[in-house]
Amino acid sequence: MVWHSNNVCFMVIIFIEMARRGINDMLSTPRYIFNKATLRESYINIQSMITAAEVHYALKANGEMELLHTLKDINAGFEVASDEEFEKLKRIDVPLERIICGLPVKTAQTIRFLYGQGCRYFVFDHVDEYRKICRNAPDAKKILRIYITDLCSGSIEYGMHMSNVEEFIGNDSNRFDGLSFHISGNDNIDLLFRVLDRVEALLQKIPQKSLILNIGGGFRIETREDFFHKLDSRLWELKNTYSLRILCEPGQYIVKKSGVIITKIVAIREQDNVFNVFIDAGFPTGIHRKPEYIKLYNRKRTPNVDRKIKIYRFFDNTCMHQELFIQPFRFYLYEEDYLEMGYFGSYSICRCNNFHSWKTPKVDYYE
């Protein structure tokens, strides 16, 4: 949904803070704004919908310290994939039992570091990785990630293939502590059930008891009403039948709607009945997809609305001239208009870069 409005929303924080901090600072863009209450609500919401599982927030979606503090304060669990992510959690005193490492391929140095710091949960998807963990983190939980891309074609291709899984679990000398998988961007419960059928078939062949099952993340924020109800029911069946400890590690679901980016129009160029709009946000500031909505704040004039749809192509003002996205409007945009773009709480700030020596965007938080 894309629309324009001058009503109360994220942007009102800009106007309040303008008076408190001074107009020159608060008008600087691009600027991310995060609602910590929305972040908490999202975490609590998914925990309430997947009651059979412990929820561990995946830091790769957004590792901003203020957001991690907010989640820590509501006793969230966390999933890390690097030394640096682990160190962020250690700096804010997250209990070790609430931290897991879900990266399937790691250096021996990373395993030794995390294990030495107290991490006791590692994932592997190959026998060589398993042996590496055994050598460098002998007392840690070792979780076998299984391949599911043959069932869900859009999934990331980590995971041990089934022929190798059968051989691995059939070897009595291999001692591991659970299974994991990850479906990317899934809202199809039938696909998920097919994966869980595969998991159950394996559980029946594993002699160890009291295993861990990690169902990953990748849950869609907007999905069918009964998706999570059906998922939770199936997980409880597995949990009770096989005495499982079940984990999940959503990232985007938890943080996406908590953040927006405020940007200003630098220039507009009409070309062949299309308006090219150049903004001061873009690829260097973490904009890698089309926003889910746009709100217009026109400081100098009332938006000129008519019935004719105008096509706007958005670009950042780098030398690449690479299109960000296309969006039709029934009103005109003008140079120096402000735009609120959402939702960019996830996979945005962590993708900022120094192209053209662009500065990292300012980040503000509010309740």
Image (cartoon, rainbow, N blue to C red):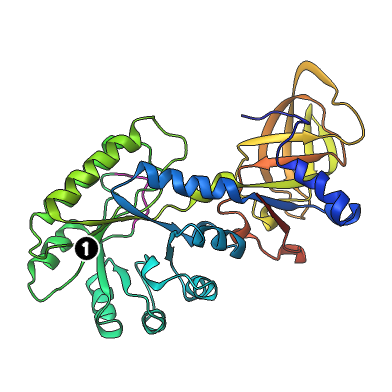
Q: Tell me residue 33's x, y (percent).
A: 69, 50
Residue 258 left/right relative to 328: left
Q: Is residue 95 left or right of residue 4?
A: left
Give the left or right position of residue 260, taking residue 166 as reference.
right
Q: Name the main secondary structure of what is drawn in magenta.
A: loop
Question: Whole-percent x and y of residue 318?
Answer: 76, 55
Q: Residue at x 29, y 68 (%)?
A: 124
Res 11 → quadrant: top right
Q: In the image shown, does 340 or 305 lie closer to the viewer?
A: 340
Q: Kindly identify the residue that appears in the image at 79 percent across and 26 percent down.
A: 273
Amino acid at the residue labelled 1: Gly
Classify residue 159 by image quadrant: bottom left
Q: Residue furthest right?
A: 300
67 shown above or below 150: below
In the rendered structure, does residue 205 fall within the stretch colored magenta? no
Between 65 and 206, which is closer to the camera in this rendering?
65
Residue 62, percent from left and from top: 55, 58
Could you say whether the residue bearing mark 1 is in a helix, strand or loop?
Answer: strand
Q: Is residue 227 left or right of residue 70?
A: left
Pointer 1 residue: 178
**Quadrant where the image shows the N terminus:** top right
Say whether residue 228 is visible.
Answer: yes
Q: Nearer the viewer, residue 207 or 69?
A: 69
Neighbourhood count class around disc 1 (C-alpha, 10 Å): few under 14, some 14–19, many 20 upward: many
| Any part of residue 100 in sight | no
Q: Which residues are magenta?
A: 152-157
Residue 56: image x %, image y %? 40, 58
Please check the rendered image and state whether residue 154 is part of the magenta-colored stretch, yes or no: yes
